[in-house]
Amino acid sequence: MTDSAESFLKKEYAYGFVTPVESDAAPRGLCENTIRFISKKKREPAFMLEWRLSAYREWLKMKEPDWSSVRYPKIDYQDIIYYSAPKQKKDGPQSLADVDQEILKTYEKLGIPLEEQKRLAGVAVDAVFDSVSVATTYKEKLKEYGIIFCPFSEAVREHPDLVKKYLGSVVPVKDNFFAALNSAVFSDGSFCYIPKGVRCPMELSTYFRINAMDTGQFERTLIVAEEGSFVSYLEGCTAPIRDKNQLHAAVVELVAHEKASIKYSTVQNWYAGDKNGKGGIYNFVTKRGLCQGAHSKISWTQVETGSAITWKYPSCILRGDHSIGEFYSVAVANHHQQADTGTKMIHLGKKTKSTILSKGISARFGKNTYRGLVKMAPGAEGSRNYTQCDSLLMGNRSSANTFPTIEVNNRTSRAEHEATTSRINEDQLFYCKQRGMSADNAISMIVHGFCKEVFKNLPMEFAVEAQRLLGMSLEGSVG
Amino acid sequence: MGAGVKTEYRMSHVVLRSGFSTLQYTDQDMKTHQYLEAFEKLKSGRQSEPAWLRGLREEAMVSFVRKGFPTMKDEAWRYTDLTPLVETPLALAEEKPELSSDTAEALKEKHGRNLLFVVNGKFLREHSSIPEGIEVVDLAEAIASAPDLVEPHLGRYAVSGHDAFSAMNAGLFRHGLLIRVAENAILKEPLHIMNLAQAARKGSVFQVRNLIELGKKSKASIMETYLSGSGNRYFTNVVTEIVLEEGATLEHCKVQREHSEAFHIAATQVIQRRASSFVSFALSTGARLMRHDCRVALAEEGASCVMNGLYLGDKDQLLDHQTFVDHQKPDGKSDQFFKGLLSGNSRGVFRGHIRVCRDAQRTDAHQTNKNLLLSEKAKVDTQPQLEILADDVQCSHGAAVGQLQEDAFFYLRSRGIGEKEAARLLAQGFAREVIDRSGLEYLKETLLERMNEKLAAQLRGRS
């Protein structure tokens, strides 16, 4: 690495503070009683508890997967606190005024517009603090459209039919080890339902924050878009700096009915550990969308800059004819971060289309893996896939892997995959420097150019944040 | 470290060293049993073999029996179901295969004079003509007469732990070829090895082991053809180890035209020293189930490797090609280009893995795999893989699966060309690119001919 490059990547993690709120937590460890405790805390109906317990029993039978490229010390599942909530005087905050001032300050520090009055960005936010949702904004306005946007635990109580119908329908309990664990102990998350023909008037957003120590965060998001509806959903995450690794195992399920469209964007900035690889979040997430109806569309955009380990494959099941799946991703692995991410596009319906665009950046000791599957079932006649995966390497200890799989089982479908791996082009760098740019600026410009195609798919506010994050997380590490 | 590397054996109660007779049989054993029996039978005749070889064989066989046949749960065999092979009763081929002078003559007439005959896995010197400047010996003879030539290489590259079939081969091979090209020798004419499968009363297994060594700055062209003479239901398991010393250049062409009921499993392991060059071409049209693992290690600086391949399948064929190019040292170059055409109910599998090790800076590695599906039921599974641990590299891979282009097809039809002819022209154009790229000028005609023969059959069977 050159010195100039070295200096580019230095800024520290800015969201690493801890908020001093008292929390109400479950005892350490996991057994059926922990699950009963969580369910009781959430005042859930009986069906939910049963569902959780059956998931727990399945989980006990399962083995932690070891097929990926990520390496980490064994997780002691009995040493995790599965439920932690900021202590409240009443059962739940009725309005923003009831929310603990400390928490509001936290979100203010993070730049999240919780205070509706300010109408900052015109974004409806559901803020999840450790295991519970602390505030949801713009609820009333959304209600006028018939849109339900609320904490998951509220949905379980108030819209049990919808929850019953869709929960686990895209990511079944038995899907994988972490999904089963999540199904058993998930504490909160967001629920969103867009009725037929409604175009959601604003961006919906959930902001996740891990605060307490030794807790795991297991949230669950479910978005259902009825026929002809549209929703754009954003998700952001941060956590304090801690020496110990913390587990985050979320499940996200999307269901798009006929002609519905869901756009799901993530800017993931969990604490990534220090420069020696100590601490950080294990981000083991299952995300999957089902294009149930004809002409439906699900689009995933993710910017992964945080977490010690990221392990997620936002996928699309293209069941409806003419349905569309998209995956746009930028994943950064700096210092000792490991990212094993990619997507699955399962083409079942006729004339379905999918696009995959993945950009991986590895710096210093970072390890970035793209792992993907494109499958054309025999019935997916006339389907089409295009995949492009590029990796950028900075520093001779970094590594990049690309492991796509393409299975084509019918003649009329086409799948294309292209991938490249290289380091920053010396000629481009030289050209910029020769025009009087500093090496830092030149590198930053080249990196942003590399990611541009993905960023342009993010909603405006997020694109700005993502660019800033990318610059921050790479500062001082380029070479 | 936790959930990381873990090896689990499917059976735990194999008793080793005290001889295989004490084995308790499980389901897994039953499948490997016939091979184990063959191993025991051969043992008595092997007392004269050097100790290192006996050790190597024993170890390999233990590893094979322990792990058993790979299943579709093994990542490397995810798309290749070995059940038909595993369940076919097979026996080692008899020791003295026959080849009539007439057959040999006829083949020479067709394939050129410089033919080397290997029948049922055994080298028949009397019918073969060996070009000047190259040394060809039966491997068994070489082991007996000049073990020093064999010991440093045999089993050192195609390590038995890698896969079951290499292990099985190490335990069971009796014959094969030792081919050596002296330092600075430049071969003017290509060497053509004709592997023939001759009739046997019941299914035979041919366990063939080859060792090819090219001295410094030498240059040679070697072509291997696998053909069925009068045999049909047989299993060829061939392991070839190739060593290219500094500055050596080898052109290697493998044409697999086994019988449509045969099984063909091949492993080629190449070790490249400094600035050596390996150019290979694989044409696969035969066998009911074929698998070729080609592993190339660019073990020293500045080595280069070009691999081209074309696989054409129809009926129920399964054609599986796997490559592993391992860039271990700086300034290496590799280029892979594989194409497949599948018709009928056939299945194509391709997995190409490029690894660039930490030291291998300034590596240039590329790979392309393209497939055409010619029928409703044909299938393709492709997995190009890049594993890059160095930063100053240029690497890429690409894969595509599709059908004959509609507009091209329409264009030809609009010019009055019949449907079948148009399909043939397009398929031919698609396939031909690989042969044109291969740079093996002297073989081009032969390869095109083989390609066209198979294409005609494929398009006939197109549904």
Image (spheres, coloured by chain):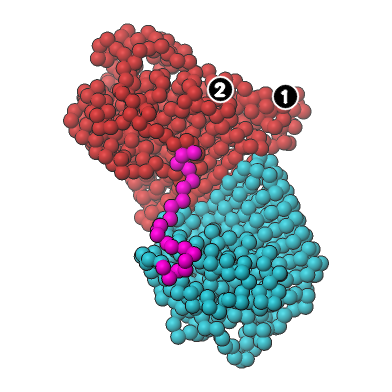
Chain colours: A red, B cyan
Q: Residue at x 54, y 32 (%)?
A: A337
- Magenta stretch: helix, strand or loop mostly: loop
Chain ID for label 1? A
Query: In this orientation, does residue B219 appear?
Result: yes
- Location of mark 2 (residue): A468
Neighbours of disc 1 within 10 Å: few (<14), some (14-19), many (20+): some
Looking at the image, which is closer to me, A174 or A202? A174
Which three-letter amino acid code belongs to the residue tagged 2? Answer: Arg
**Quadrant placement of the N terminus of chain A:** top right
Left or right: B323 as drawn, with respect to A346:
right
**Quadrant placement of the C terminus of chain A:** top right
Find residue A437 and name its label: 1
For the residues bearing labels 2 and 1, Cβ distance under 8 angstroms: no
The vertical placement of B125 against B248, above or below, is: below
Neighbours of disc 2 within 10 Å: few (<14), some (14-19), many (20+): few
Q: Residue at x 29, y 17 (%)?
A: A140
Q: Which residues are magenta?
A: B1-22
